[in-house]
């Protein structure tokens, strides 16, 4: 079953750009990370602090990413980050993003595409510090479809 798609929009400011007036690439990853959490909020997933109490889940950290930059963006642009779940795996999932910008002709320009592999994380048990991957609860998967 296909995932829901949620759109998170950001306005590019002067300080988001490098001296050539092009968005400095780490900002795309900051906005995509925000779009990831926004996706879960819009799907009705409780905040991480509530999931920590009910399921032991503390968040969805990133374990792999692949991005393709297609066009540049600059200050004054409004970018739309379209987020969805492309694939559910055992203890991980692939979150897909398409970053677009409206163009004057009424369409949109594709600026960037990105796939991230994320996990649902819980604290390690016992005396070993760190996190561990857990299977995404079925109720969360249903909310995101």
Image (tube, rainbow, N blue to C red):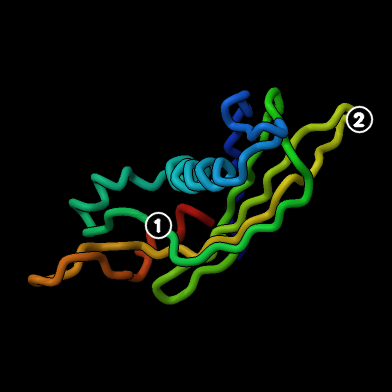
Q: Position of residue 100 (x, y in %)?
A: 73, 41
How many angstroms separate mark 1 from mark 2 (CA)?
39 Å
Q: Is residue 52 left or right of residue 4?
A: left
**Residue position for label 2:** 105
**Residue position for label 1:** 140
Q: Where is residue 105 in the image (x, y as percent from the top left)?
A: 91, 30
Disc 1 + disc 2, Cβ < 8 Å: no
Q: In this view, does 128 lie to the left or right of 109?
A: left
Element under disc 2: loop
- Taking the view exactly as shown, the residue that stands out farthest to the left is 127
Q: Quadrant of the N terminus?
A: bottom right
Q: Where is residue 32 in the image (x, y as percent from the top left)?
A: 54, 46
- Taking the view exactly as shown, the residue that stands out farthest to the right is 105
Q: Quadrant of residue 131?
A: bottom left
Q: Quadrant of residue 7?
A: top right
Nearer to the camera, 115 or 68: 68
Q: For the residue carrying disc 1, how many other residues have a C-alpha within 10 Å: few (<14), some (14-19), or many (20+)?
A: some
């Amino acid at each position: 079953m296909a995932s829901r798609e949620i759109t998170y929009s950001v306005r590019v400011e002067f300080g988001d750009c490098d001296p050539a007036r092009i968005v400095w690439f780490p900002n795309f990853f900051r906005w995509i990370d925000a779009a990831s959490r926004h996706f879960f909020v819009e799907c009705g997933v409780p905040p991480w602090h509530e999931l920590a109490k009910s399921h032991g889940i503390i968040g969805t950290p990133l374990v792999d990413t692949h991005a393709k930059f297609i066009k540049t963006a600059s200050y004054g642009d409004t970018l739309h980050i379209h987020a969805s779940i492309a694939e559910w795996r055992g203890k991980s999932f692939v979150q897909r993003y398409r970053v677009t910008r409206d163009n004057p002709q009424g369409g949109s320009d594709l600026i960037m595409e990105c796939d991230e592999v994320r996990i649902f994380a819980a604290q390690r048990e016992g005396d070993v510090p760190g996190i561990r991957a857990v299977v995404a609860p079925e109720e969360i998967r249903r909310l995101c479809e």
